[in-house]
Image (tube, rainbow, N blue to C red):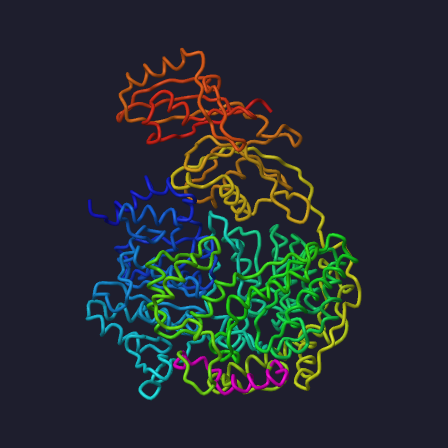
Amino acid sequence: MPITYDNLKARLHDDVLSRVQKPSRYLGTELNSTHKDPAHVDSRVCLAFPDMYDLGLSNLGLLILYSLLNARDDVWCERAYAPALDLEQILRHEKLPLFSVESKTPLRDFHLLGFTLQYELSYTNILNMLDLGGVPVFSRDRGDGDPIVIAGGPCVFNPEPLADFIDAFAIGDGEDVILDMVEAERQTRGRPRRERLEAFAAIPGVYVPALYPVKEIDGGWIVPDLEKASPIQRRIVPDLNAARFPTDYIVPYTEQAHDRVSLEVLRGCTQSCRFCQAGMTTRPVRERSLDELDRLLNETFDRTGYEEVALSSLSTCDYSQVRGLVAQSVTTARARGASVGLPSLRSDSFSVDLSDMIRTIRQTGLTFAPEAATNRMRAVINKWIADDDLVAMTGDVYARGWDAIKLYFMIGLPTETDADVEAIARLANRVHGNGRKANHRAKVNLGVSTFVPKPHTPFQWDRQINVEETHYKHFLLRRILGRNGPKFGHHDAVTSYLEGVMSRADRRAGRLLFLAWQGGARFDGWNEHLKWDVWEKALAEWGPDPDSFLAEIPRDRPLPWDHIDVQVTKQYHLDEYALSREGRLTPDCRYTKCNDCGVIHDFTKLCAGMLKTTRQGIKIERNWKRPAHLGGAAATLAGPETGIEGSRNAAERRGQGGAPVIPLLAEEPSDDWRKPDAPEAVCRLVFRYSKTGLLRFLSHLELASVVQRALRRANLPVAMTQGFHPLPKLAFATPLPTGMESVGEWADVTLTAEVSPEEFAQRLNAVLPDGLSVSHAQSRPMDGKSLMARVEAADYEVHVPLAPDAVCVNVEAFLASASHVVARDTKNGRKDVDIRLLVQALSVVPNESGAVVRMRLVDTSGKKGRPQEVLGAIIGDTAPSASIRKTATILAAA
């Protein structure tokens, strides 16, 4: 039978999803996912993340575009993710296409198919998704009826390795350009494909490789021919307050790598770290106002029930009113039993104060990224903090009760020596030893990555160390760290090597990607999935020397990415390159004077607005006092060297070649604000609920997360556990197996205010997703037995496609038997179990399609009847195709 939209959906739901490890990755019914009638929209768009759902769902860029497009009545935007290996195997074996998660539409049937390029090691997944989705892998092979394949994200600043596969790249911020691309596709639909691509090439900020002239230069390099075409200037969102933020954040069932809301507080960075591509390609800094951020945070909590929000940006500590932002966010989050997180912090005492402010609900480790461990190397990369200041600051962190600190460094930086590498280990040991003096539980997690010279940075001409050099530097670090010191983690040398090749390669790398993908390369960024032998074979067959892409590049040679204009000029990068070799620091232009990077010539008003916002923030921060509920004035920072004012003064001295002085906090903040007194528990409710439909595919842990977030959305006063990671006081009677429906589950919850059972059920049902519902709730004594201790048995119904009389004969024989032993796999190995002792009742009822087997099975600690085993005993091999539904959980009296 040909695969159609309807039968593909039914096939996936009724058969395929029950055979994969995590079916919840592919349901597409998450809270706030968008579903429309295809007949009532004009444009179908699929945004594809070329990695697993567990990593891709939380990608903020994709969520912003998803929300933006679905706000239009004439557009339906859906999502697709790289299938895990188990699903890919099924799709290929059964010749099924890769699909969007919402409607299960094959990728080939969309008008626009857009990939987000977050990291180079996802490139082979793009080829795999195209092939699985029925879209020709090479752009040149696509016909007039194939979707237009577009891409955006951080990696587009050197799009050349993907030039053979992507029809059009969106350069820069995507909010406006994606709407232009949707309109271009709609207006040219039905025309010859070249005409369609020409329409895309006419959009500002869009690069169409097939139409852009290139030339070959010495060494075989393929570079843009700028004599025949103009550079592609990136698009930029000028007003972040007016830009869309998805407060209708998609809430997943599956646990994510970053399972939280990322609230984007600002975009851009002007710190001028010379290795940082993101800081060079997102200028100038644009902030959201405090009022707008407060509105967005409240809306997001209302619509999601998330338990954590991260104040997200390249450098959140540089927000102009960051202390007010953190205080405001913590106040909002704490009222909902949620927490606030900060990304990697500045390595100064100002960050310590901010960190103390966010630990009012949950305490996790803090992350600092000094990147280099000697003064010389810090001057080279333009990221300054003296060793003594770092040790004192981290010691202060440990003294305040934090147990774990993460320190990130890079190896292989330009001009690095063995002594510079060894200094990383010595500094980490020093931080660890000093921390143990203040806190005997002090831990240091040391993360080390290999420097990759990224395009559009001052270091884009530098060489990257090879695999052997990387291993040698890891050896130097291990030798000094020892066994009982900091925990050492590092990026894999091979993955860093491949990342470097793809970061600086030209169009010739397309063939390498194709060869590696054909050989089976998938998920190259995952150590457990990387197939280095496949890559070695592809590299040998490819032709060009891969090391040539990692070698030092002459600074007068054209670059493969010269046609991508990020407004920061090549001359600025050359000047910064020279300053790095002289060991001279460049100040942050937000606090001193313009460094003439080039952005101001294209965005004069935006740069002026950035400076105005910064000056206003300095005045406000200078007089800021911590609110009483966050410790009051006792924890206020002293002196002008902290916060925005301190950044300004430090920047001025950096411009003079001096190292900034970073003072410690004036006073140790009191402990009374860190852990707010938990409200007293006054009410306990037990409720019965159903889990049906697609939500039968949720695991028990996924179900618990869904209910916890629903309780927050319902604004119910749930009591929390104690400790550094408080959780709602919510307990379930039994864990339901993944894939099984039930209309008879029980759970109980403890509340800090009286809520009637009727009101509780009404409020919770109003926010539960389809497939979950509360049918009954009742009050229970606060000191009553736990639900799990009260479970005695469970009732099941099983529909089997057999004649009732034949099933009855088998049931009677089973009931008449004295025992029926089966082999059961347990964590301690195989065990023989007499399942006859676990069956309390067993009967057969005829129905239209066969028979319904009803059973009551023992369900107590250490003795649990399994309906699949009973089915196997009475109907043999037919059991796996039967539909099992739990109808009741039998509880003993409270």
Q: Which residues are magenta?
A: 561-588
In the rendered image, residue 801, in percent from the top left (x then y), is placed at: 28, 26
Residue 120 % position (x, y):
43, 66
* On-image quarter of the N terminus: top left
> What residue is shown at x 32% (from left), y 50% (from top)?
104
Number of marks drawn: 0
- Which of the two residues, 233 or 340, is positioned nearer the viewer here? 233
Q: Quadrant of residue 531?
A: bottom left
Residue 787 located left or right of residue 139 = right
Q: Residue at x 65, y 85 (%)?
A: 655
Residue sitting at 59 percent across and 68 percent down? 290
Tell me if residue 484 is in the magenta stretch: no
Above or below residue 277? Residue 603 is: below
Q: Relative to residue 880, is residue 153 depicted above or below?
A: below
Q: Quadrant of the C terminus?
A: top right
The answer to whether residue 494 is left or right of residue 638 is left
Q: Is residue 307 above or below residue 834?
A: below
In terms of depth relative to the viewer, which is nearer, 819 or 722? 819
* Camera-side residue of 449 and 153: 449
Q: Place residue 198 in its image quadrant.
A: bottom left
Q: Position of residue 469 (x, y in %)?
A: 55, 68
Task: Tell me what residue is drawn at x 33 percent, y 54 percent.
Answer: 36
The image shows residue 452 at horizontal and vertical percentages of: 51, 71
Inspect the magenta stretch and tell me whether residue 583 lies in it. yes
Can you say whether 816 is above or below 15 in the image?
above
